[in-house]
Image: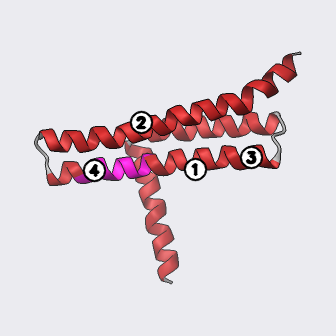
Amino acid sequence: MRFVTSVRNAARGIRAALKSERHMRFHFFAAVVVLIIGWILKFSSIEWAILLIVIIGMMALELVNTALETLVDLVEPDQHPVAGKVKDIAAGACLVFAIGAAIIGFILFIPKLIDLLV
């Protein structure tokens, strides 16, 4: 029963992030689009695995970033240089992963799109 409660709480957290965080909604929408295109392009099992790892990693990191920002806002509601630094570092981690995800996306999608057009 604890497991079910834990899953419900986690799902509530994901819904809360989707409702309140613009970046989370963007990543969710982008994931849906990328998954559809991957299906159309008939990705291999390895390509699916890579794509899913990247999507899941980005979503998880965005959830951690949201949790950190929320916690910092709770602990330090006024602007404070250290609070700002913590939030900037967490956002930076998301940016680094997003850049890596985009590069991996190009590696996966561009050759297939070129083959489709040629």
Of marks 1 and 4, the one in the foreground: 1
**What secondary structure is found at the residue carrying circle 1?**
helix
Q: Distance between the residues labelled 1 and 4?
A: 21 Å
The answer to which of 107 and 36 lies nearer the viewer is: 107
The answer to which of 96 and 9 lies nearer the viewer is: 96
Q: Distance between the residues labelled 1 and 2?
A: 17 Å
Of the residues shown, which amino acid type is indicated by label 3?
Trp
Of labels 4 and 3, earlier in sequence is 3
Of labels 1 and 3, earlier in sequence is 3
Q: Callout 1: few (<14), some (14-19), or many (20+) C-alpha neighbours within 10 Å?
A: few
Relative vertical location of residue 9 with respect to residue 103 in this rendering, above or below: below
For residue 48, the mark is: 3
Relative vertical location of residue 15 with respect to residue 117 in this rendering, above or below: below
Of the residues shown, which amino acid type is indicated by label 2?
Arg
Picture quadrant where residue 80 is located: top left
The residue wearing badge 1 is 56
- Contact, mark 1 vs mark 2 (Cβ under 8 Å): no
The residue wearing badge 2 is 22
Q: Distance between the residues labelled 3 and 2?
A: 26 Å
The residue wearing badge 4 is 70
